[in-house]
Amino acid sequence: MSSKDGESGASAPRKTPILAPTPESKPTARAELTADQQAKYEALLIKAKSWTDVTCDKEKEKSGPILDRERAWLTRDCLLRYLRATKWNVDDAAKRVQGTLGWRREYGLDDFTPDYISPEQETGKQIIVGYDKMGRPCQYLNPGRQNTDASPRQIHHLFYMVERVTDMMPAGVEQLSLMINFKPSKKRQNTSVPVSTAREVLHILQNHYPERLGKALIINVPWIVWGFFKIITPFIDPVTRDKLKFNEDMKQYVPAEQLWSEDWAGQMNFDYDHDTYWPALNELCEQRREAKMARWAAAGKVIGESEDYLAGGNDTSVTGFTYGASGGKVCLEEQMVATTLDEKAPVTEAEPQAAVTA
């Protein structure tokens, strides 16, 4: 018998992602924009709607017309994250957003495949499973399970998984909880990483994933890692530093039933099995991306779309378009919440609907 979402699964360990937060886990309500903030958002939106090309500074041959997937990435919430990160400076936010569009192309982020990343993932050194009390997906990093030598693909693996975390975010959630366990293994006693690698990762996170880190929960921190954190602390902005929590009772932040029992003192009995977990995670994330793109296309493919609408949190687009179910179909998100991949229940994508005036 397979364990259910949100339960510890006493009879057998869970081997697939959890589909939704616990009913008690709720994101913090977004603050209303002030009149000044709204005006600055509208100014940035006008700029974004005028962009016809993506410029790649380092690999100029990758420059070219903006693609649908890049336009869909330019959501209202995305633009607001960059505005907050630049203290509401419209020109700075626009420059950073364009820089990220170019970086994503040069890095090849949207083209990494599960097969390419799979060798890095075989030991479960990164796992996305469960949600914290704010509804944020939990991404576990297990350096003691390192199975490859340093290479660009190691960092590609990290950001591939960050992208999958964003796929797993429920409506109303924009951030993740990073769960780092520095417990050594018999094969790998030194769980630190080169400072140059850490600086590259921090640079990418701070410049291309602004406002994405909710909490970083860190356990089993050895002295050598403490030294490592002291070295990189100057490169971490003060807001991010305040999000780091070391060796605390992590049930303060993550419901016990969705907190890994191994080392984390939670109730979720999870066992990493690559042949089961990896295809399940990628299938689920692909379904959610396709569902979001279907909703985006149905509403007119606008720049500045609401992420809540795309994730199925509501059915009204920023344009007033209403996305509804027909023929008694249950929407994709409801199906995913109601079933588990353990049971291999089929999930069909909701079809784009005709516009209904709001």
Image (cartoon, rainbow, N blue to C red):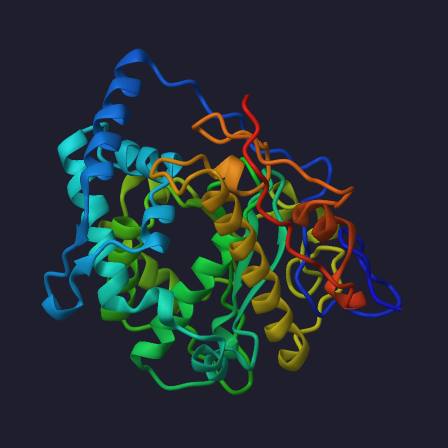
- Write the residue at 48% across / 52% down: 166
**Residue 268 located left or right of residue 173:** right
Q: Tell me residue 339's x, y (percent).
A: 78, 55
On the rendered image, what quadrant is the C terminus found in? top right
- Write the residue at 35% across / 35% down: 304
On the rendered image, what quadrant is the N terminus found in? bottom right
Q: Tell me residue 31's x, y (percent).
A: 44, 21
Q: Tell me residue 75's x, y (percent).
A: 37, 40
- Write the residue at 52% across / 87% down: 187
Q: Nearer the viewer, residue 132 or 311?
A: 311
* Residue that extends furthest to the top in the rendered view of this protein: 35
Picture mark count: 0
- Write the residue at 23% across / 60% down: 103
Name which quarter of the figure residue 196 lies in: bottom left
Q: Nearer the viewer, residue 236 or 220?
A: 236
User: Can see residue 195?
Assistant: no
Q: Nearer the viewer, residue 184 or 40?
A: 40
Q: Nearer the viewer, residue 296 or 307?
A: 296
**Residue 318 located left or right of residue 229:** right
**Residue 306 located left or right of residue 92:** right
User: Can see residue 134?
Assistant: yes
The answer to whether residue 166 is above or below residue 76 is below
Name which quarter of the figure residue 268 lies in: bottom right
Q: Tell me residue 51's x, y (percent).
A: 19, 44
